[in-house]
Image (tube, coloured by chain):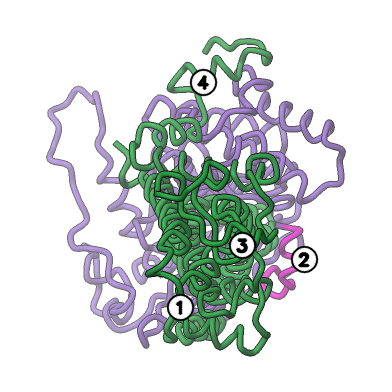
Chain colours: A green, B purple
Amino acid sequence: MERLSSASSFWARMRNPEDRHPFFDQIEKLFKNKTGLAGLIIITLFSAAAVFAPVISPHDPIENALYDQLKPPVWEEGGAAKNLLGTDDLGRDILSRLIYGARVSLTLGVVSVGLALTLGTLLGALAGYYRGWLDNLIMRFMDIILAFPHILLAIVIVAYLGPGLRNAMMAIGIINIPRFARIVRASVMDEFGKDYVTAARAVGAKDGRVIFNAILPNCLAPMIVQASLGFGAAILDAAGLSFLGLGAQPPIPEWGAMIAEGRAMILRAWWVMTFPGIAILLGVLGFNLLGDGLRDALDPRLRD
Amino acid sequence: MGDLLEIRNLKTYFHVRGALLKAVDDVTLNMKKGETLGLVGESGCGKSVTASTIMGLVPMPPGFIAGGEILFEGVDLVKVPESKMRKIRGSQISMIFQEPMTSLNPVFTVGDQVAEVIRLHEKLSRQEIQNRVIETFRLVNIPAPETRIKDYPHQMSGGMRQRVMIAMALACSPKLMIADEPTTALDVTIQAQILELMNTLKRETGASILFITHDLGVIAEMSQKVAVMYAGKVMEAADVNDLFGNPRHPYTVGLMSSIPVLGTGKKQKRLSTIAGVVPSLFKLPEGCLFHDRCTMALKDCSRVEPPVTDLGNGHIVCCHQCN
């Protein structure tokens, strides 16, 4: 096989379909998937909003403006270009609060999914690799967690730790551990029977090395998909907790908390509650679409 | 020269669904340094379990070693603790698997996987490891090793992948290589190349090979000694010339006569087969394990287990006929 010098070899490999890393095929497949691409675009927009919040938001999200209370959006009568999506009862600009809210939601997603992913992967891998009593112990405990209604358990944990954004993230992370543990356990068990695992043991690798170095990289696909879906779920759960007053505390511009604040004036000022609701909807939808797109791109059974 | 590997009365059993499976039952084998021992037998006769037991890779539970010893350079591997066994695996004893398609990790480059073996057993710098990998690739005749080490398994052909497996097995210059049907999954021309390569490497490195296969032709080409296994027991063991020239166990005879012969000029007879099937390990027959398929069975065969008879010159057979 003719090979090119290493400088141009990356692009050469990209062009030659037989020679390139399957990762690029999967990226290409994700881009060709319309709904997956839509999810990716939504999330990119939200991420950009979160990163550049101080630059793009027209107002300070927390600053009160007593003369601008409950201004409607710009296209309604009485609206002004100063507050594109209107203001809430303290005169705070809704658009700015939504943009900063993206920051809160994404941070929360990263932290809680990170927590659930790390612990869930560890527990699932141990259960799937060692089987026997350890498997039973871990997975029955996961079953117990799953037996509680999702939000109820989160409420219990937050009630114990005390309300606040940080504790809400931890609670959401904890209730999501079983999802990851189950998926990782199943993948590890699936991979365990394959020859390369025996081969890894046959060259004298320790159990830890076999699990983390040989098996887990092969389980990445379902983990990535679950992480993406979990992100959406985490945002939704956090909004729920904040709505109940257990998550983000005022004046943090969290979408769920914004809905809760606007609840009292839904008949007078619909925009206070509606726009954060749309933001949650789009955020969760984006992650779910991306998750489904990733599943299609990464699942070998769906490959043509 | 002393024996490199000496297996004495090895018994590897499994508890499966309340039954006791004697996958390897009272197996005695020995190998000298630089020798290739061929282990032949039908599927499920305990060849691979014997190999896993030597490597210490039998899943326990359900498996357990009910007795016997595996002396590797005088050390009993059955009693060696796992931490020490780990140091032996890959560096002293290594293994080549049957399926080159599945026995390489799909998410790492082949060079990385060979490097991993060296990394596990020797303290070398990155550059030294890289050089060793390239050197090993050259040893197993992989062309353009400097670029090939960056390939992923799916970019290589079956024969090349098996060469990588052999490179992995060779990377730390082991004293014993266990090859579990290394050519079964390859097509015939590649098979010949791989066998040739293994023979050359054995001469160059002085490593002994335990060669497991169900292909008698391959055995004849590869090994100096042969052991024939059936339902977990060694039925006959001898020098390769003895075994092929003067097979004594009816099972060995049966195996030999069921090899098709090409180009003898005479009109070919219908290929003979051994009647019946391998008994299930769940329901082994009384007496000699082979008696219900044996053409020369005596009265005693169905009642009394035949003793192991030494015919001299290392030719061992387990049959009432030879007693």
| Distance in Å between CA atoms under marks 2 and 1 | 24 Å
How far across and how far down the image is residue B16, in percent? 39, 80
Chain letter behind tag 3? A
Residue B83 in the magenta stretch? The answer is: yes
Q: Quadrant of residue B58?
A: bottom right
Q: Are marks 4 and 2 on the same chain?
A: no
Residue B47 at least partly seen: no
What residue appears at the point 57 percent right and 69 percent down from the top-left corner?
A: A120
| Distance in Å between CA atoms under marks 4 and 2 | 45 Å
Q: Which residue is mark 1?
A: B14
Tag of residue A14: 4
Q: Are marks 4 and 3 on the same chain?
A: yes
Q: Earlier in the sequence, mark 2 or mark 1?
A: 1
Q: Are marks 4 and 1 on the same chain?
A: no
How far across and how far down the image is residue A283, in percent? 47, 53
| Distance in Å between CA atoms under marks 4 and 1 | 50 Å
What residue appears at the point 25 percent right and 73 percent down from the top-left corner?
A: B298
What residue appears at the point 41 percent right and 44 percent down from the top-left corner?
A: A75
Which amino acid type is marked by label 4? Answer: Met
Q: Which residues are magenta?
A: B77-88
